[in-house]
Image: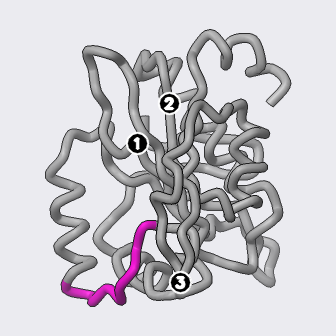
Amino acid sequence: MPYLYGERVRLRAAEKSDISLFYKWVNDPDVTENLVLHYPVSITEEEAWYEGMISKAVENHVHVIEIRQHDEQGFPYWLPIGNIQFLEVHWRPRHSEVGIMIGEKDYWDQGYGSEAMKVLIKHGFETLNLNRIWLVVYEKNLRGISAYKKCGFTEEGRLREAHYQHGQYSDIIIMSILRKEWETIKERV
């Protein structure tokens, strides 16, 4: 399965040639504001991260989120705007954490992240036969929480004051979607 498609997005396997793009994104403070990253990342570290990621099982590889664009002559091409992945699939209980980053800020708040998440959720339930997909989100990330709710995620718990940033403690919210919940909403989301 070379690509996973939504209406406006496609997910493809990350390539070595994407490292410079990832490097740019993970060193942008606006992009990493709601991510776990707290330090600048060198290109060498990003290359090492890529090699470590690619050595894992294929279901844990990063997918590049691309959107269809057209050049000046009207020819279509795919523009990378972020990435998404199952962080670690656990086969016996059939669950995985998911992570997403929209690195191109010009494409924030246009629904691309929600659509990419829906594509990966569908893949997780229909292809990988997962039963539960979950994520963690900082309570201040209202845009993310809203997007995850649109995809069918519900809050299942909080780690109280488990996040420290900008001199303040805040909660980390755990959200999930179960296969049976997705089955009832998949036509609407």
The circle on residue 86 is 1
Q: Amino acid at mark 2?
A: Ile
Q: Are marks 1 and 3 in contact (CB under 8 Å)?
A: no
Please tell me whether residue 38 is drawn above or below residue 124 in the rendered image. Answer: below
Q: At numbered mark 1, what does the secondary structure look like: helix, strand or loop?
A: strand
Number of residues whose C-alpha sits closer than 10 Å to that of mark 1, classed few (under 14), some (14–19) or many (20 or more): many
Please tell me which of labels 2 and 1 falls first in the chain.
1
- Residue drawn at x 54%, y 69% as measured from the top left: 169
Q: Quadrant of the N terminus?
A: top left
Q: Are marks 2 and 1 in contact (CB under 8 Å)?
A: yes
- Residue drawn at x 85%, y 24% as measured from the top left: 188
Q: CA distance from mark 2 to mark 1?
A: 9 Å
User: Where residue 101 sits in the image (x, y, percent)?
Assistant: 55, 63
Q: CA distance from mark 3 to mark 2?
A: 31 Å
Q: Nearer the viewer, residue 73 or 106?
A: 106
Tell whether 185 sits left or right of 43: right
Please tell me which of labels 1 and 3 falls first in the chain.
1
Residue placed under numbered mark 3 in the picture: 167
Residue extent of the magenta highlight? 36-44
* Chief SS of the magenta region: loop
Q: Amino acid at mark 1?
A: Phe
Q: Mark 3 against mark 2, which lies toward the viewer? A: 3
Number of residues whose C-alpha sits closer than 10 Å to that of mark 2, classed few (under 14), some (14–19) or many (20 or more): many
Q: Is residue 80 visible?
A: no
Report the label total. 3
Q: CA distance from mark 1 to mark 3?
A: 31 Å
Residue placed under numbered mark 2 in the picture: 133
User: Where residue 119 sits in the image (x, y, percent)?
Assistant: 62, 37
- Residue drawn at x 48%, y 23% as measured from the top left: 132
Q: Nearer the viewer, residue 137 or 164?
A: 164
Quadrant assignment, res 40: bottom left
Q: Amino acid at mark 3?
A: Gly
